[in-house]
Every structure is written in C-alpha cells, then in structure tokens.
Amino acid sequence: MERPLEEKVAIVTGAAQGIGRAIAETLAQRGANVVVADLQLEKAEAVAEEITSATGQRAAAVRVDVADSASARGMVDHAIAEFGRVDILVNNAGITRDNLIVRMTEDDWDLVLNINLKGAFNCARAVIRSMMKQRYGRVINITSVSGLAGQAGQTNYSSSKAGLIGFTKALAKEVGSRNVTVNAVAPGFIETVLTADLPQELKDAAIKMTPAARFGKPEDVAHAVAFLASDEAAFITGVVLSVDGGLVMSG
C-alpha cells in the first residue's frame, strides 16, 4: 500500500472503537503516527498497541474528555511532546441520547451538544495555532447524514452535527491561507456496535432507503478521511463529503 501520510502525526478522538478506530488504523497504514484519544483509556491503549504491532507506526494512547477544554489542550500538548508536531486532527468523538423533544431532558441536550459540537471546537482550538505556525494542517470533522437531513428523535444529535458543518465551513475560511484545510465527512448507516443493536425492521428500512442497498463499513469512512488528510486533497476545504451509499443526495 502507498504511504501518502508518511511521518505525518494524526490525532483521532473517539478512537477506541468503531469508526474512530478504523480511522486511526487506516491513517497508520498509510504512514502516519497516531494519537489514539478516547475517554476509555484502557481500550485506547489496546488499540494503540495493535496499530504499532500491525503497521510499525508509532501510536500513543491518551485519555481525553473533549467536552473539557483543559483536557483537549492536554491531549494536544501530549501529542506534541510525544511526536513533535500535529498535522492531522480528526474530530470523531460523539454520542447520542435519542428521544422525542417532548421527552428529551435538558441534560441530554447539553451532553450531546457539549461532546459533539463543543468538543470539536475545544480540540480544534487547542491545535490550530501550531498548524498555522507550521503552515500545514488537516482538520476533519465527522458529522452525519442526520446533520444534513435531520432525523426524528434526534433534535440534539442532528443539531450538533449540523452545527459541526457550519463550524467546518467557518474555520476553513479562517485558516485556508495558512495551508490548513478543514473538511467534514458525513457517514450514513455504518456497521458498528451501535447499529448492530438496532431492531431488524429498522435495519431493513434503512437499507431500503439507501441506494447502495447496504450498510457501510467503518473502513468506508476511514478511506474518505485518509483522502482528505492527504496532499491529494490539498485544494479541498470547507467540503462535506457524504459517505452514505446515496442516502442523502444534495447538489
């Protein structure tokens, strides 16, 4: 496999499992050294060890609570101390607390917005000065088809992911002249632990709505992220790349 990210340094949040893990593994396969950042440190450490064993790349695990600005800053400081720089930030950490708005609590609203949207702000703010100073950086935010089209029962999640799209476009305009690109990837239905627990009738309905007639795999999202992180995407910024099998079509 080509190694277009040779010696680049990437931070991936929410990387202990699912899509985040696939992203961290794929970036390492393409030559990047990786910071596996997650609230679950033991799982993150296991992923980092497996990445090093499988790819030969350096990988470090860091515990981070992205909703806490000091924790996000500490994650970036750790990465720079360990590897000397940060070239790629993937804001993947996210949660759901689904409910109809008449039953949704204020706490569930705040928690989802704080992790999914404020978390991306905290991590990007912590790393962006160093990227601008070195005149190189890639920020990739993992949004969702729910942020593009909305989803009943997800006013909190859809709002956080739609906000992340606006954040992506605004930050892209702020830092573009310093050779820092900011893009987003919007996954559709992806095979993860979360979707595995969905009732079969919901899975069938989701597949019926998807022109590709299947769920995606975490690697499908990871490959899109790897492309946006590479120099091949150097003239792409402020873009939302849907990885959803055609579920939400726009443009």
Image (cartoon, rainbow, N blue to C red):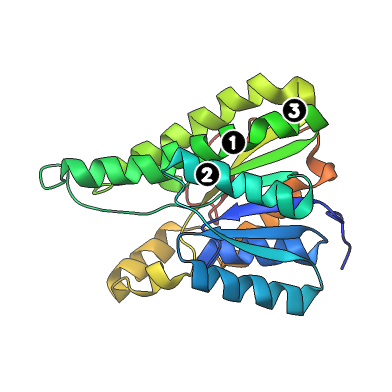
Provide the residue designation for mark 2.
Answer: 72
Residue visible at 43% across and 32% down in the picture: 163
Tell me which amino acid carries mark 1.
Ala
Provide the residue designation for mark 3.
Answer: 132
Whichever of callouts 1 and 3 sits on the residue coming sooner in the sequence is 1
Q: Secondary structure at mark 1?
A: helix
Residue visible at 65% across and 20% down in the picture: 173
Please give left or right for residue 84 compared with residue 64 in the image.
right
Is there any visible trace of residue 237 in the rendered image? no
Query: Do callouts 3 and 2 mark residues in contact (Cβ within 8 Å)?
Result: no
Residue visible at 23% across and 47% down in the picture: 108
The picture places residue 100, in percent across and down from the top left corner, at 17, 47
State the quadrant of the C terminus: top right
Tell me which amino acid carries mark 2.
Ala
Tell me which amino acid carries mark 3.
Met
Structural distance between the alpha carbons of marks 3 and 2: 18 Å
Q: Nearer the viewer, residue 88 or 149?
A: 88
Q: Nearer the viewer, residue 116 or 221?
A: 116
Outermost residue, front direction?
81
Structural distance between the alpha carbons of marks 1 and 3: 12 Å
Query: Do callouts 1 and 2 mark residues in contact (Cβ within 8 Å)?
Result: yes
Outermost residue, left direction?
102
The picture places residue 143, in percent across and down from the top left corner, at 49, 45
Q: Secondary structure at mark 2?
A: helix
Please give left or right for residue 104 compared with residue 11 in the image.
left
Provide the residue designation for mark 1.
Answer: 126
State the quadrant of the N terminus: bottom right
Q: Residues within 10 Å of mark 3 (few under 14, many from 20)?
A: some
| Position above or below: 169 against 75 | above
Q: Secondary structure at mark 3?
A: helix
